[in-house]
């Protein structure tokens, strides 16, 4: 999509919330994210499972303190998946280093 945001400040409130959740998590998985018209909805079924790595940095991502920044390609790819699927459920979203690395999407048959 040509109008895809490229900066954090250009994201919708729902997307900013999801990006901040990924930064806070750093390593782990998120599940049960609803995709409603290309927007993430973190409702009562939303879950986070943190992973802690031995001999690794397990702190919150430093980007979390920035009010604005360029979006990494991984975030843009995730937005593209949400825009393509439009209405589905993200069964599992793997996060590494505060960025999405793998996503399992459950769509209607």
Image (cartoon, helix red, strand yellow):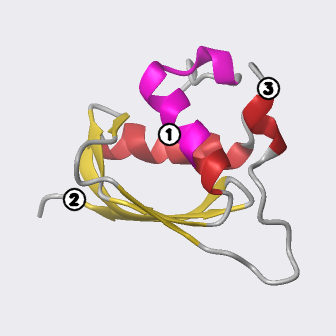
Q: Which residue is labeled 3 in the image?
A: 66
- Residue 18 is tagged as 1
- Residue 107 is tagged as 2
Image coordinates for residue 87, horizontal then vertical, percent: 23, 42
Q: Earlier in the sequence, mark 1 or mark 2?
A: 1
Q: Quadrant of residue 69?
A: top right
Q: Nearer the viewer, residue 50 or 79?
A: 50
Residues at badges 1 and 2 in contact (C-beta under 8 Å)?
A: no
As measured in the structure, the alpha-carbon distance from the residue carrying label 1 to the one carrying label 3 is: 15 Å
Left or right: where 85 falls relative to 75: left
- Residue 65 is tagged as none
Neighbor class of circle 1 (other Cα within 10 Å; few <14, some 14-19, many 20+) is: some
Q: Residue at x 78, y 57 (%)?
A: 59
Instruction: Pick the quarter of the image with the C terminus.
Output: bottom left
Indicate the secondary structure of the residue bearing disc 2: loop
Q: Residue at x 88, y 81 (%)?
A: 55
- Magenta residues, as a range? 8-21
Q: Earlier in the sequence, mark 1 or mark 3?
A: 1
Indicate the secondary structure of the residue bearing disc 3: loop
């Amino acid at each position: 999509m040509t109008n895809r945001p490229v900066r954090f400040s250009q994201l919708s409130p729902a997307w900013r919330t999801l990006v901040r959740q990924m930064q806070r998590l750093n390593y782990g998985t998120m599940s049960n994210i609803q995709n409603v018209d290309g927007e993430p909805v973190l409702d009562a079924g939303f879950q986070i499972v943190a992973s802690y790595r031995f001999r690794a940095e397990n702190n919150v991502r430093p980007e979390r303190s920035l009010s604005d920044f360029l979006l990494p390609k991984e975030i843009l790819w995730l937005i593209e998946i949400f825009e393509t699927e439009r209405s589905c459920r993200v069964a599992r979203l793997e996060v590494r280093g505060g960025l999405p690395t793998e996503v399992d999407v459950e769509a209607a048959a």
